Amino acid sequence: MTQNDLKNFQLLVGEAIMYFQTIEHDIRIIYAAMKVGDLYKELERIESEKWTLGQTIVELEKLDLSDGKAYISNSDYKFLKTLTWKRNNIVHKTYQNFLYEGNVDIQDEKFRKEYKDLQEYTQKMRQVYKTIEETRLKALKDFRNI
């Protein structure tokens, strides 16, 4: 693992965290837009009740599927449900998975595996982020005329 490799990995970790945050925020907005009542009060309620990412995904899916007209595809829900575990793993474990390895060759091998996994997952998040952003805009238009 070179210094350049590590810097690129760090940039990718930052990008992944950005997607976690924006996707989480967008699904909260989608939920609040779809929920009957005041959009901003619903967002305040979600925030004050400190909904977790996982809780928000579950609640959105229930609400989304309640009228038989899903805004978000089953495959995207399946991916969204992986976000909580993956976010926690990236934030709390991804560096530990290779940095504390004493053998340089094994450390390099573990780093390459983490890097490859992170690249693949971040690529998928780029696609889902765009879909969720489009869905947020559509939900605001369809449910709130915004």
Image (cartoon, helix red, strand yellow):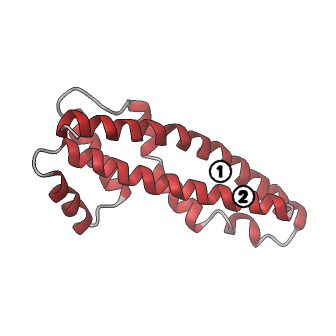
As drawn, 132 above or below 21: above
Tell me the crowding category of disc 1: few under 14, some 14 to 19, or many 20 or more residues within 10 angstroms, Cα based. some
Q: Position of residue 39 (x, y in %)?
A: 17, 51
Corner quadrant of residue 14 = bottom right
Q: Amino acid at mark 1?
A: Leu
Corner quadrant of residue 105 = bottom right
Q: Earlier in the sequence, mark 2 or mark 1?
A: 2
Is 128 positioned to the left or the right of 141 in the image?
Answer: right
- Secondary element under disc 2, as helix, strand or loop, is helix
Q: Could you tell me which quadrant the N terminus lies in?
A: bottom right
Is 123 positioned to the left or the right of 7 in the image?
Answer: left
Q: Which mark is residue 9?
A: 2
Q: Which mark is residue 99?
A: none
Residue plotted at (69% across, 62% down): 10
Residue reaching furthest to the left: 37
- Secondary element under disc 1, as helix, strand or loop, is helix
Q: In terms of depth relative to the viewer, which is nearer, 51 or 135?
A: 135
Task: Identify the residue position indicated by label 1 in the image.
Answer: 118
Q: Position of residue 11 (x, y in %)?
A: 67, 59
- Disc 2 and disc 1 in contact, CB within 8 angstroms: yes
Kindly report which numbered mark, 2 or 1, lies closer to the viewer in this rendering. Answer: 2
Corner quadrant of residue 12 = bottom right
Is 6 positioned to the left or the right of 62 in the image?
Answer: right
Q: Could you tell me which quadrant the C terminus lies in?
A: top left
Tell me the crowding category of disc 2: few under 14, some 14 to 19, or many 20 or more residues within 10 angstroms, Cα based. many
Q: Position of residue 22 (x, y in %)?
A: 44, 53
Residue plotted at (36% across, 49% down): 26
As drawn, 55 above or below 134: below
Q: Amino acid at mark 2?
A: Phe
